[in-house]
Image (cartoon, helix red, strand yellow):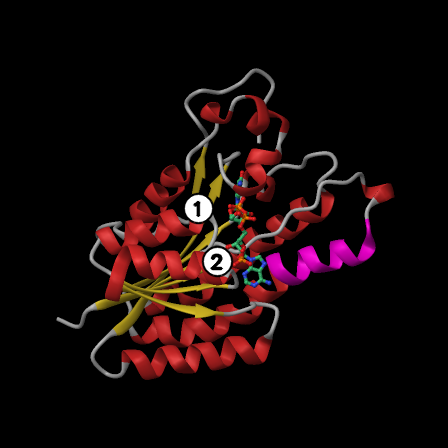
Amino acid sequence: MIPDHALVVGSTSDIGAAIVRRLVDMGHSVTAWGRDEERLAALVERHGSEVVCDQVDVTDDDAVIEALERLDRRLGDETELRVVVWAVGVFDWAPADEADPATWGHVFDVNLTAAARLTPRVLVRLRRAATSTLVFIASGAAHRVFANNAAYVASKHGLAALAAATFLDVREAGVRVSVVSPGLVAAGAGLRSPLGQTSPERLLSPDDVAGAVEYVVGFPGHGCPVLVELQPLAQAQGHGR
Ligand SMILES: NC(=O)c1ccc[n+]([C@@H]2O[C@H](COP(=O)([O-])OP(=O)(O)OC[C@H]3O[C@@H](n4cnc5c(N)ncnc54)[C@H](OP(=O)(O)O)[C@@H]3O)[C@@H](O)[C@H]2O)c1
């Protein structure tokens, strides 16, 4: 059997690193993309030859194309790219009437435009490897709206719509496309939220998100969990993200 390979885009966050870990535990070899050199090196140190890291800024289209070509060369004919997880995301906390337009543009560039540019490029490969899986880490903010967060909310709504519509185009080819939408996670921007600062133990953990990815990737038969929404069991009063 041809061994499975997974690409994790945004593997340098705690969430991304937990997803890499989970995919390795599932028996995948992994290519891990990110920008942070130290965090990429830490992945290699932890996983050894199971993980190959590549420093890629997803807003740099040429860099993305070159990194995919490097991936193809590494995999050769012996290994299929069977899983792609998009876990990149940037935040902006500001009321809309005080927000920095350039920051809003950047939020869209990273969270939505870069994901959209990557999607057809990886689908070509995932179709060849079908049954295969493309997972987008979205957010509760992909399905509901929150104050002081309009660009993030809109970009994540766009990401969820991109995924749902993409699924319609590739389902017959055997490519699963799933949205995993966690509530607040005790990681990254989640830790900067009011609840994250006072009671991080009440948030989801990066491993919870990785568990949802495992559920999607390992889904048996020919179904596709198109949307997995995750909320922590310990739910603080009035906290709904
Ligand atoms: N934390 C939460 O509560 C929460 C809740 C729901 C969903 N999420 C989603 O989970 C994902 C990770 O979020 P996080 O909170 O853990 O944030 P984080 O620690 O700030 O991580 C952000 C990730 O995105 C990558 N990234 C950002 N800009 C990039 C670019 N231009 N090119 C390549 N990579 C880039 C970062 O890589 P480098 O550091 O290497 O640049 C890092 O891996 C995001 O999609 C976020 O929307 C988070």
Query: Rounded to the nearest whole Å, what is the CA distance between mark 2 and mark 1?
Result: 9 Å
Q: Secondary structure at mark 1?
A: helix
Three-letter amino acid code at disc 1? Ile
Question: Quick check: 8 above or below 204?
Answer: below
Q: Nearer the viewer, residue 152 or 66?
A: 66
Q: Which residue occupies 67% across, 37% down?
A: 145
Q: Alpha-carbon neighbours of circle 2 within 10 Å: few (<14), some, or many (≥20)? A: many
- The C terminus appears in which quarter of the rendering? top right
Three-letter amino acid code at disc 2? Gly
Q: Secondary structure at mark 2?
A: loop
Residue 83 shows up from this direction: yes
Tell whether label 1 touches label 2 (CB within 8 Å). Answer: yes
| Mark 1 residue CB less than 8 A from any atom of ligand 1 | yes
Q: How many numbered circles does the render carry?
A: 2
- The N terminus appears in which quarter of the rendering? bottom left
Image coords of residue 92 (percent x, y): 70, 46
Residue 222 shows up from this direction: no
* 23 with respect to 164 (left or right): left
| Mark 2 residue CB less than 8 A from any atom of ligand 1 | yes
Question: Quick check: 233 above or below 130?
Answer: above
Q: Which residue occupies 48% across, 28% down?
A: 203
Quarter of the view holding residue 81: bottom left
* Mark 1 lies on residue: 15
* 114 with respect to 66 (left or right): right
Magenta span has 106? Answer: yes
* Mark 2 lies on residue: 10
Range of the magenta residues?
100-111
Quarter of the view holding residue 44: bottom left
Image coords of residue 60 (percent x, y): 60, 73
